[in-house]
């Protein structure tokens, strides 16, 4: 069966660590391996806007010796004109892997079910698992470990980043706290999956409404935009709701004194995070952005090897 990467819990804890170790190696030795030499092509498809994901996949695929084929859905036959599974059946005749940023998680599942090449979720409404690999690599670089650390995500608890923190953090054995208004809590099914995983890795899952209580004792404080792509019509209501979840210096001061600040970017400065925090000494957002490159290269190499598409 083809291994895909559609959600953070598609990897076991050991597999997540294998990929993070490879990501660290590829950061030290950027051109150490070129399994896509030929060049062999990876398709990278965008239904939504992107800067980091587009650049990091394009550069990473080229670093691996391959050729990135960047496709905008609007100028393709995806997006309602052809089913994801029919598109995937065409892609698989020509490319080694398909990377897709889209809306519904079900589209990714449909595409993955219909193809023999690995499908990678480059962000959906529900999850952003490539970002979490980069975040975990960054946390390990700065803290030396993952298991046992406490990470608090503040803001829209139902957004892709919060839900990916639940699954990836639980897989890593971390204590994951989400602080969100009651109407923006993570999906109960994701919390249940994360809790089951945490029970097996020694991690824990806690959902808070009170931001101060959630940040007390945290090793890592994370936030994300209050208005994710696709939620623009709710912008006014969201800005009016999320104010007390803004990460400012006072809130950061309630975390551990050596806590990291993280944000997947792009940031709405002055809304979910203030400039002194994102530009401050505890912020590691630029390392986090760079690590998209190394973590995704490691993921691609790992998936190609696991699926027998390149020699291990
Ligand atoms: N963090 C992230 O995925 O950024 P882009 O939307 O710019 O790709
Ligand atoms: N939650 C944000 C992440 C952007 C990288 C969004 O979906 O827009």
Image (cartoon, rainbow, N blue to C red):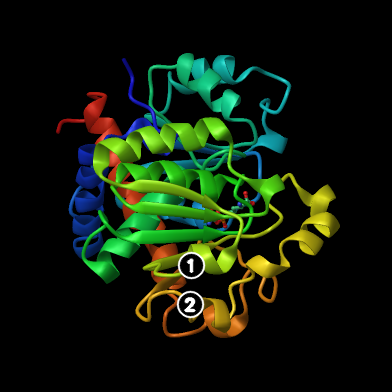
Q: Quadrant of the C terminus?
A: top left
Query: Disc 2 to disc 1, how far (Cα)?
Result: 6 Å
Crowd around label 1: few <14 · some 14–19 · many ≥20 (10 Å): many
Horizontal placement of 25 versus 307: left or right?
left
What label sits on residue 215 in the rendered view? 1
What label sits on residue 41 in the rendered view? none
Which residue is found at the position 45% from the left and 76% from the top?
A: 283
Which is more toward the observer, 151 or 199? 199
- Whether residue 104 is situated above or below residue 262 in the rendered picture: above
Which residue is found at the position 58% from the left and 65% from the top?
A: 211
Secondary element type, mark 1: helix
Q: Where does the image place residue 216, in percent across and percent down from the top left? A: 45, 70
Residue marked by disc 2: 254
Q: Where does the image place residue 227, in percent across and percent down from the top left? A: 71, 55
Task: Judge whether residue 146 can be spotted in this image.
Answer: yes
Q: Where does the image place residue 251, in percent across and percent down from the top left? A: 55, 76
Which residue is found at the position 42% from the left and 46% from the top?
A: 205
Could you tell me if the residues under marks 2 and 1 are in contact, i.e. CB atoms within 8 Å?
Answer: yes
- Whether residue 252 is situated above or below residue 289 in the rendered picture: below
- Whether residue 165 is situated above or below residue 114 in the rendered picture: below
Quarter occupied by residue 34: top left
Which is more toward the observer, 152 or 290? 152
């Amino acid at each position: 069966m083809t291994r895909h990467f559609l959600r953070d819990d598609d990897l076991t804890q050991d597999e997540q660590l294998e990929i993070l170790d490879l990501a660290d190696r590829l950061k030290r030795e950027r051109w150490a391996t070129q399994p896509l030499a030929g060049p062999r092509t990876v398709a990278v498809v965008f239904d939504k806007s992107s800067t980091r994901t587009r650049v990091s996949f394009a550069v990473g695929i080229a670093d691996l010796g391959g050729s990135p084929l960047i496709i905008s859905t609007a100028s393709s036959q995806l997006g309602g004109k052809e089913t994801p599974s029919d598109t995937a059946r065409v892609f698989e005749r020509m490319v080694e892997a398909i990377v897709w940023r889209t809306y519904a998680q079900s589209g990714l599942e449909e595409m993955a079910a219909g193809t023999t090449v690995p499908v990678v979720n480059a962000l959906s409404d529900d999850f952003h698992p490539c970002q979490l690999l980069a975040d975990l690599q960054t946390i390990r670089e700065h803290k030396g470990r993952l298991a046992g650390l406490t990470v608090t995500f503040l803001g829209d608890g139902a957004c892709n980043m919060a839900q990916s923190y639940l699954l990836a953090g639980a897989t890593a054995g971390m204590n994951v706290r989400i602080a969100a208004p009651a109407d923006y809590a993570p999906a109960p099914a994701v919390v249940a999956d994360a809790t089951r995983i945490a029970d097996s890795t020694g991690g824990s899952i806690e959902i808070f409404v009170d931001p101060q209580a959630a940040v007390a004792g945290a090793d890592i404080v994370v936030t994300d935009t209050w208005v994710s792509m696709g939620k623009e019509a709710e912008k006014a209501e969201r800005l009016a709701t999320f104010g007390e979840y803004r990460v400012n210096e006072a809130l950061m001061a309630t975390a551990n004194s050596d806590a990291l600040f993280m944000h997947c970017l792009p940031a709405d400065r002055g809304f979910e995070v203030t400039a002194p925090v994102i530009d401050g000494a505890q912020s590691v957002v630029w390392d986090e952005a760079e690590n998209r490159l190394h973590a995704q290269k490691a993921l691609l190499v790992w998936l190609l090897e696991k699926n027998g598409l390149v020699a291990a």
